[in-house]
Image (cartoon, rainbow, N blue to C red):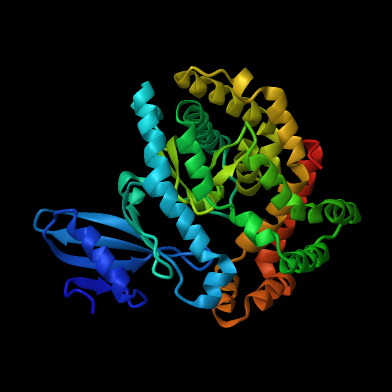
Amino acid sequence: MAPYNFEGDFGNLTDKQIEFIKKVIEEQDLKVNKVVFKPVGQAGDNFVASVMRISIEGDNGSMKMVIKIAPADEKTRNTVKADLLFHNEHVMYTEVLPKLVALQKEVGVPEEEHLRYAKCYGSMNEAPYEVILLEDLNESDFKMLNKFDSLSDECVRSILKNFAILHSVSYGLKKKQPETFESFKSKLIDVWTVNFSTNEARSYFELLESAILANLDEEDHKTKFKSNFMDILKLPIQLAKDRDCKYSIVQQGDAWTNNIMFKFSEDKLEQSVMIDYQGSKISNPVGDILYMIFNCADHETRSKYYYDWIDYYHTELDRCLSYYDLKVNYVYPRDRLDADLRRYGKISFGLSAMLTYVLLRDTKEAGEMLESFKSGDPNDVLELMGTQPLQGETAIRTRKRIVGLIDSFSQFGLL
């Protein structure tokens, strides 16, 4: 039974989840009178979790939290690998991120350069009841931008600075507490490798390749796409190699527009915060860089700023490494960064094309796809995603983004 002071849309929560949420709320010492639940976002905004915002009112004050809830349906859980994703986020919020910030404080990194993340009030990592309660960043004037629009130069630079902070403190942890770094490596699960190492994955990507080719007009674009897309299947091999590489760091792992929030003051960007760590893993820095640049910006913006962005990241990494008495030329030299960008080029191209096909659907199509997760066999769902024709504006938007990927990867010598 729900506590008498719970109101709103919380019908999908289990008794175990409700009890855990109630316990976390009681720990805030607000003498609660009322807790109101409201869903967050639209279909397609959150593919793995149900997200709710709760407003807590009490005699000692009020506050808001964001709650991420794992899907309960077994078919959905199997399709999206919910147990692995929520495990990663639990480890990141309860162990990795606090440890990284503690190290920053230990070496004297200024507070304004501490790794910013949503405070975690509580996390239950018991399948299939996973739930995590986080700081509501809207209360600090952060907002999410439109996933259909390209991020600006200043937004991309802000995220690259976040990467430089995250990656540099990872290198610092490797140097000062190698056992802790190895512990995190053993706990964080590379979900991409799990998903891509199956026979079903090859079948899905073959279907997806055909669907995307059918949506392209120019023969040159079709030829380049077909020559490179299936390299996506090499991702597990590449990630396995880089997991134990001397250059490996803690990756955020899923930095696309809906997983980043931005704070503006009079239209000037002040700060950005990464808000999702379900795809986090130990791997190469360029995984974060390429993923964000090619899934958050359009071809026109990339054409102007791509090389400046790579320069900026490496400069920021060097500056941040100095707090740990490390030099970028020894830790992650520029020629190595450039080589890794090329090495991951074709794989990143395939990954970005796949994500474009999935993430840029409008609300109606995204909702239909999510419903299919709940009602079908996982393999049938993957086949549907690879063969279902895109509709109207989604088809136009997806075609433009895929063509932009082909043009950008070609322009930067990554194919």
Image quadrant for the C terminus? top right
Horizontal and vertical percent for residue 205? 76, 64
Using the image as rendered, state which of residue 182 and residue 231 is in the foreground.
182
Horizontal and vertical percent for residue 299? 71, 44
- Tell me what residue is drawn at x 44 percent, y 74 percent: 72
- Tell me what residue is drawn at x 79 percent, y 63 percent: 209
Asked whether residue 325 appears in the rendered view, the answer is yes
Q: Height in image: 202 above or below 134?
A: below
Judged left or right of residue 297, residue 84 is: left
Q: Quadrant of residue 157?
A: top right
Q: Quadrant of residue 76?
A: bottom right
Horizontal and vertical percent for residue 239? 67, 46
Outermost residue, front side:
179
Judged left or right of residue 411, residue 299 is: left
Horizontal and vertical percent for residue 231? 79, 52
Outermost residue, bottom side:
375
Using the image as rendered, state which of residue 230 and residue 92 is in the foreground.
92
Image quadrant for the N terminus? bottom left
